[in-house]
Image: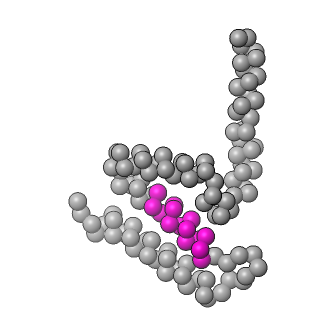
């Protein structure tokens, strides 16, 4: 196989991962599309597997925080047609306090 054709095929296969395409993907990313994107879910699963195997408390806590904040924003923030009201702000605030309280418990109160 010729090295030029091999390089052209590799360039063609890796072109979706160019910086411009990645930035455009991240700009158009919403919480709903992030929860349904198999690449993001797969990355979370790989990180979870790593954290469980290594038993890294920091990585597990960071993963818990990222997933719980995604779910919190997904279920409590209003859609484009709704306006921001107290009925959607209070669950978001108390959910954030619960997440923060659980992280503080894991790091400062719970001993192994």
Query: Could you say which is closer to the camera, residue 105 or residue 15?
Result: 15
Q: Quadrant of the C terminus?
A: bottom left
Question: Farthest residue in the top direction?
Answer: 2
- Magenta region: 63-76
In the rendered image, residue 28, in percent from the top left (x then y), is placed at 73, 57
Q: Is residue 64 magenta?
A: yes
Residue 57 is situated, as x and y percent measured from the top left of the image, at 35, 55
Q: Is residue 12 highlighted in magenta?
A: no
Question: How many numbered markers are drawn?
Answer: 0
The answer to whether residue 64 is left or right of residue 87 is left
User: Residue at left 71%, top 11%?
Assistant: 1
Identify the residue shown where x is 60% and y is 60%: 35
Chief secondary structure of the magenta portion: helix
Q: Quadrant of residue 11?
A: top right
Q: Is residue 70 left or right of residue 15?
A: left
- Horizontal and vertical percent position of residue 46: 48, 46
Name which residue lies at 71% across and 41% down.
19
- Please say if 63 is above or below 42: below
Q: Quadrant of residue 86?
A: bottom right
């Amino acid at each position: 196989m010729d090295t030029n054709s091999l390089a052209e095929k590799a360039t063609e296969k890796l072109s979706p991962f160019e910086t411009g395409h990645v930035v455009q993907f991240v700009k158009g990313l919403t919480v709903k599309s992030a929860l349904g994107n198999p690449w993001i879910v797969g990355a979370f699963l790989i990180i979870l597997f790593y954290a469980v195997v290594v038993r890294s408390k920091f990585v597990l806590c960071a993963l818990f925080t990222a997933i719980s904040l995604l779910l919190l924003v997904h279920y409590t923030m209003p859609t484009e047609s709704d306006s921001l009201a107290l009925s959607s702000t209070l669950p978001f605030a108390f959910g954030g306090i619960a997440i923060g309280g659980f992280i503080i418990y894991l790091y400062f109160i719970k001993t192994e």
